Amino acid sequence: MLSSTLLRMPLSIRAFRRPACALALCGLLGVTACGSDQEAPAPGASEASSQSATETTRTALPSEHETSGVASTSSEKANKNPNLKKARKQFGALAPKEFFDQFDSCDANGVQNSMACSGEKIGQFQFFKSDSKAASTTQLLTELRSSRVVEDTGRRVVGWSTLGSTAVITVVDNNEGLVMQQMVSTDDKDPAEQIYALGLAQRPQTESSTMETPAATEPAKS
């Protein structure tokens, strides 16, 4: 017999899955629409090294233009989809700034105080602002045997829950009542690696500290 806690897990997954599945089609359409903006060829800088000083001066302007273009990408996206700015402001405590830069679109997903955002490389995420959801999600992450936690400071909890070959990556900010979730297939991605790659938690330093062990110094010769 499954425990009452385990019985709640499929309901939680299904509650998340329904809007996530609806978001999938919208996310693909959004990615396709934004594809032409992201794939615009950047001005070539390699020719500058083989050109004269005059030509180098002329190519300096495209190089600066390329840099400014990268810097203005986020603002251009925000102008096309104002919800990007809204999502960053409302849920910015959940992830680093660079994380939100990767989204192409954000939209309301039919649940009060929640949004669904997607990006070509980052995938699809759902955001919620609810103290009760933050508390219940934290309980699921920390109590279920099918869940794993990679960071738990009390205020911030990062981990994932699994059901079959599906994992729900989750970040919770209990002080702000914020929740962020992404569904991934464990056949395609390791949830822990996905968390570290997105900068949602710091990778354990055990391996790096072992590699950085200083070599023994030779005794000084008299």
Image: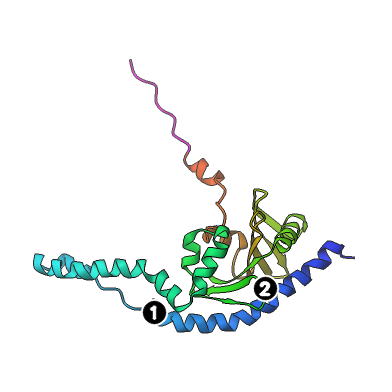
Q: Give the mark nearer the N terminus: 1 vs 2.
A: 1
Residue to which mark 1 is pinned: 37
The residue that appears at 51% across and 81% down in the rendered structure is 30
Query: Does 218 appear above or below 138?
Result: above
Query: Which of the 4 image quarters holds residue 183?
Result: bottom right
Give the number of the mark in front: 1 or 2: 2
Q: Position of residue 80 (x, y in %)?
A: 44, 78
The quadrant in which the C terminus is found is top left
Pointers 1 and 2 in contact (C-beta within 8 Å): no
Count of numbered tags: 2
The secondary element bearing badge 1 is classed as helix
The residue that appears at 75% across and 69% down in the rendered structure is 12
The residue that appears at 71% across and 65% down in the rendered structure is 162
Q: Which mark is residue 112?
A: 2
**What segment is highlighted magenta in the picture?**
213-222
| Label 1 crowd (10 A; few <14 / some 14-19 / many >=20) | few
Q: Amino acid at mark 1?
A: Asp
Quick check: 96 left or right of 47? right
